[in-house]
Amino acid sequence: MTNNVTTANNGLNRNAIGLWSLVFFVLATNGPLTGLVGVAPTAILLGNGIGLPSAYLVAGGVYLLFCVGFVAMSRYIRNTGAFYAYVANGLGRPAGTAAAFLAIVAYAGLQIACYGMIGFFLAHGLGLAGLSLPWWCCSLFVVLVVQLLSTRNVAVNGKALGLFMTLEVIVISLFDLGGILHGGGPAGFSTESFTVGSFMSHGVGAVFVFVASSFMGIETTAIYSEEARNPERTVPNATYIAVILITALLVCSSWLLILSFGPSNILQQVTAHPGDVWFIAAERNVGGWLAVVMNVLLITSLFSIVLSLQNTLSRYLYALGREGVFLSHFAQLHSRHKTPWLASLILSLVHFVLLLACGLHHINPMTGLLPIGSAPAALGILSVQVLTSCAVIGYFKGNRRHTNLWQRLVAPVLAIGAMGFGVILIVMNMDLLTGGVPVLDWLIPLGLVLIALYGALVAIWLRRYRPAEYANLGQSLNNEV
């Protein structure tokens, strides 16, 4: 071991992150501007049309249900592996390692998709400035910057992401304010988007394929629990604040976008201008300068996502390395910044090679890389969240601790039902995420099942041949009270 690393026993940087830094980490992983500009038009077109704001509202309610059990368990489990540790403690160690491998693949898929997107938009922006570069060169440059920042002190990361997210929320709020000051649109402040008929219109099943991806990253608060100040209070509060903020932004902004053109005209607009509809509305309601700023902040939003995902993934690998599930070298920490530098470096190398290969083989980042990466991400994370809600019930079954029936049973059961239905909807509508490549429609779900099975088999192998390490799975820094 070299002198620039520490052992896992020295631990991550304690008391480095406050409440709002945690909230910003969630928002950064979620990327509200990316979700609105990049996903909402497609969700309107292929989903339930003007009922999209209702779908966001329903999804927000489901995630608040999920958070009830998740937050209750967070008071007793402090482990940077988050879902991995929760499932291991609630459903058993094999299920925990299965969840860990699913989460890693899902977040890695989302990150590679976002690297492709940021390379595409950055190359487009540089082209307008007279500098022509292929998208993959821009993506590779971003990988290097992300690697540099991800190994710095996590508090510095929190401040950088906080700045980006503050600007992002301000721009979204200006868009919303402009829509309000213009009286909504041709139909005024129509509430048709929130009627049962609009919500249940044709495509209501398909819309949740897109809506689910807009709430990814909720577990980010628990991932930083070992580095948070007063985690027993900070993690629960940050989780609820983040979910409420995300829901409010998605519901209000998508509704005001629909109002900008009118409920009867929005489908025509997103069909004709799927990539520019937000910028057209921004220029109409506020001014051309806001459209330009939104274009720029779309790139910073994507950068925030890839940086936050890098932090998330490196901490997952650190947790697995620390407990002997995966390569133990991933448990090495930077001596000064107390960050999992080696895990981050390996991730960056893998992404560098994959992006270089995609570029040399002329794979389109938007029609090729994006669907291939986002499909396993949406299905994988939602599946892990279902497992986590099941784990809440299992964890409190033998010891109620300081929970009530709503926290330990009712809310988790409702979340399992809603999210389980969401998993079924995503599988049934997988072609919307894969771009209609038939082989991927069944290969991605099957691949995720095999990955989960492999993770479970790793734990079973450890139980047979390394019982001491098996007994420690998911247990590091548990806060049993």
Image: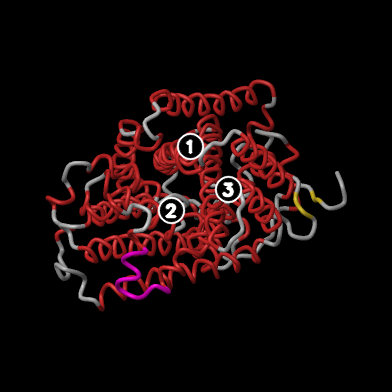
Counting every numbered tag in the picture gives 3
Q: Residue at x 55, y 43 (%)?
A: 112
Q: Secondary structure at mark 2?
A: helix
Which one is in front, 308 or 111? 111
Q: Is residue 168 visible?
A: yes
Q: Residues within 10 Å of mark 2 (few under 14, many from 20)?
A: many
Q: Secondary structure at mark 3?
A: helix
Q: Residue at x 48, y 37 (%)?
A: 368
Which one is in front, 475 or 355? 355
Which one is in front, 148 or 86? 148
Does 246 sit left or right of 335 as displayed? left
Q: Quadrant of residue 277?
A: bottom left
Instruction: Answer whether labels 1 and 3 touch (C-beta < 8 Å).
Output: no
Q: Residue at x 17, y 42 (%)?
A: 202
Residue 279, how many percent across, how many down? 37, 64
Report if residue 285 lies within the magenta region: yes
- Vertical side of 438 occupied by 141: above or below: below
Residue 287, how many percent across, how many down? 36, 75
**Disc 3: which residue:** 135
Question: Separation of disc 3 and disc 2 at Cα?
Answer: 44 Å
Amino acid at circle 3: Trp
Amino acid at circle 2: Ala
Quadrant position of the N terminus in the picture = top right
Q: Which residues are magenta?
A: 279-289
**Disc 2: which residue:** 72
**Which numbered marker is on residue 368?**
1
Question: Separation of disc 1 and disc 3 at Cα?
Answer: 13 Å
**For the view shown, which residue lies furthest in the bottom direction?**
181
